[in-house]
Amino acid sequence: MIRDVLRMGDPRLLAIASPVHDFHSEELKQLLADMRDTMAHLNGAGLAAPQIGVSLRVVIFGVTANPRYPDVEEVPDTVLINPEITPLGDEMEEGWEGCLSVPGMRGWVPRWSSLRYAGCDEQGRRFERSVSGFHARVVQHECDHLDGILYPMRIRDLAKFGFNEALFPGQDLPRED
């Protein structure tokens, strides 16, 4: 079922989400199905449970051919529950980001260049990956939602934050790194 995505300003987006303890509940299965349907419907690269009003530490992400991200590297479809992120070094890189909870806007956001993430899949099996580039950016963006952080809170220069049509008049939108 396609769910409504909360928008910036809704206080539920600022809450710290709770860990998942029961990986075999019908509620978790339905949440994941709804998240997949919602993300696909909106052509998102990822979605966090708090964005649809469920305060659990659950994110999904993945990018193949996507009209919102025409030029980015593929990111495997992933369910990540109770995530942990560890930066791999001190290098940061900035790139354009958008968000389903901040529609019609983009911002220039610093993120760790490479990281290792760990957590559980939808069956509760633990896994980890080391990633960089767009994949690392997507993971950080989605996991921020679990801690009540929206990407505008990370922007260093507000001159690089605004509505798409004002930032890029008459242009194709830049790729979201």
Image (cartoon, rainbow, N blue to C red):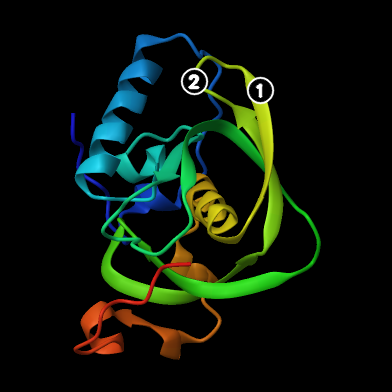
Residue drawn at the location 21% of the way across and 83% of the way down: 165
Tell me the crowding category of disc 2: few under 14, some 14 to 19, or many 20 or more residues within 10 angstroms, Cα based: some
Residue located 56% across and 81% down the image: 156
Task: Give x and y (percent) for residue 59.
Answer: 46, 38
> Which residue matches tag 2?
122
**Res 129 quadrant in image:** top right
Mark 1 lies on a secondary structure that is strand
Q: Going by the image, does 88 lie left or right of 25?
A: right
| Kind of residue sitting beneath label 2 | Glu
- Residue 95 placement (x, y as % from top left): 51, 73
Instruction: Please tell me which residue lies in front, 130 or 104.
Output: 130
x and y, in percent, of residue 102 in the image: 31, 63
Label 1 with label 2: CB-CB less than 8 Å: no
Residue at left offset 56%, top offset 17%: 21
Q: How crowded is mark 1: few (under 14 residues within 10 Å), some or many (20 or more)?
A: some
- Image quadrant of residue 176? bottom left
Q: Residue 19 carries which label?
A: none
Q: Is residue 25 above or below residue 9?
A: above
Which quarter of the image is occupied by the N terminus? top left
Q: Give the residue pinned by disc 1.
A: 126
Give coordinates of residue 71: x percent, y percent.
39, 64
SS of the residue under disc 2: loop
Q: Is residue 119 above or below residue 100?
A: above
The amino acid at mark 1 is Arg
In the rendered view, does 43 fall on the left or right side of 137?
left
For the residue pair 48 and 133, the one nearer the viewer reads as 133
Q: Is residue 4 above or below residue 152?
A: above
Q: Residue at horizontal 36%, vertical 77%? A: 174
Is 132 left or right of 175, judged from the image as shown?
right
